[in-house]
Amino acid sequence: KADGSAQLQVFAPELRAEMEARRRLVADLHDALARNEFELYFQPIVDCRRKTVSGFEALARWAHPQRGMVSPAEFIPVMEEAGIIGALGRFVLREGCRQAARWPSDLSISLNLSPLQFKSPTLLADVRNALSSSGLSPDRLHLEVTESLFLDDAEGVLQTLQSLRQMGLVVSMDDFGTGYSSLGYLSRFPFDKIKIDQSFVRDMARPENIAIVRAVMGLGSAMRMTVVAEGVETVEQMEQLEREGCREMQGYLFSRPRPAGDLPKMLMEIRSRFRANGYGVVRAD
Ligand code: C2E
Ligand code: MG
Ligand code: MG
Ligand code: MG
């Protein structure tokens, strides 16, 4: 018993400090929402067969007054747990649609939705409002959700997916292959797109990763879903993905996510590189 309480004394201050840091982060995030410290960065999604940019994915950043740009990996899970992801989600939806409405009309915008936002009773109304106030055509709005969506209430998820598609939106399964879902979900749920997670793209020297990419491509074509590869960093990865029949790609090879003002520059750089065949030999068929 003496040992046990001694251990408790060692742990308790650390635990208390951790809880305190967490409380402070949540309070800072509340302030950040009130002060509009969030902004969207944009990363191009390219169509390697058409040699063009098909759209941009919006990625949330927190412009922290002291720390600079904070990654969503740090604040999204905390905001979900603290129940304040809804306000950020509505900002992303509104701001993403507002920005995209000013782009050339052949460009789509992809927005990430947290499972909580997807299941929110106001989601469909939030989407309708963002579309009508921006004037963005619904078919240019792509929503990305992850497999954790399926942890409960599959029936509700199915209804929301169907409503979004009836409205003309495109719905993508993000980070495919990393989550809890089985292949069966893909046949039961009407996704338009599958995004192969970057963990499979990163190391395609491993035969099992190539096998996974190949399997996802097969699923995509059988179910008429477009497949997008994430995390493409090298020409070798791009060429290997092309050999597997993948045409849509996203990754540092083409561009890192950048602020809205850099969008014209990104478009110009990628287009001129494609014209000069700067990404290597692109299969022509
Ligand atoms: P995600 O939706 O899978 O986004 C792709 C992530 O991979 C982004 O990280 C992007 O910067 C990064 N990435 C892109 N290309 C490459 C590459 O070639 N190499 C490597 N190593 N990484 C690459 P980011 O911006 O830090 O976002 C992380 C995650 O945070 C996102 O993953 C998404 O799940 C979540 N997230 C971002 N913005 C939002 C948002 O507005 N709402 C919600 N709910 N989640 C968001
Ligand atoms: Mg995404
Ligand atoms: Mg992803
Ligand atoms: Mg991810």
Image (tube, rainbow, N blue to C red):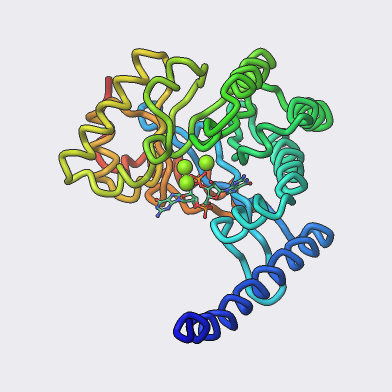
Above or below for 152 versus 79: above
Nearer the observer, 279 or 100: 100
Above or below for 57 versus 9: above
Q: Whole-percent x and y of residue 116? A: 66, 39
Asked whether residue 233 is in view, the answer is yes
Asked whether residue 139 is in view, the answer is no
Q: Whole-percent x and y of residue 210? A: 21, 36
Nearer the observer, 55 or 86: 86
Nearer the observer, 46 or 174: 174
Q: Is residue 123 left or right of residue 157?
A: right
Above or below for 219 versus 237: above
Q: Whole-percent x and y of residue 172? A: 52, 29
Q: Quadrant of residue 186?
A: top left
Q: Is residue 50 left or right of residue 61?
A: left
Nearer the observer, 13 or 193: 13
For image coordinates 68% across by 22% down, the residue present is 138
For image coordinates 59% across by 83% down, the residue present is 13
Above or below for 21 versus 99: below
For image coordinates 22% across by 30% down, the residue present is 243
For image coordinates 70% across by 55% down, the residue present is 82
Q: Whole-percent x and y of residue 247? A: 36, 29
Q: Furthest-front residue in view?
A: 1
**What is the count of numbered marks?**
0
Q: Quadrant of residue 71?
A: bottom right
The quadrant in which the C terminus is found is top left
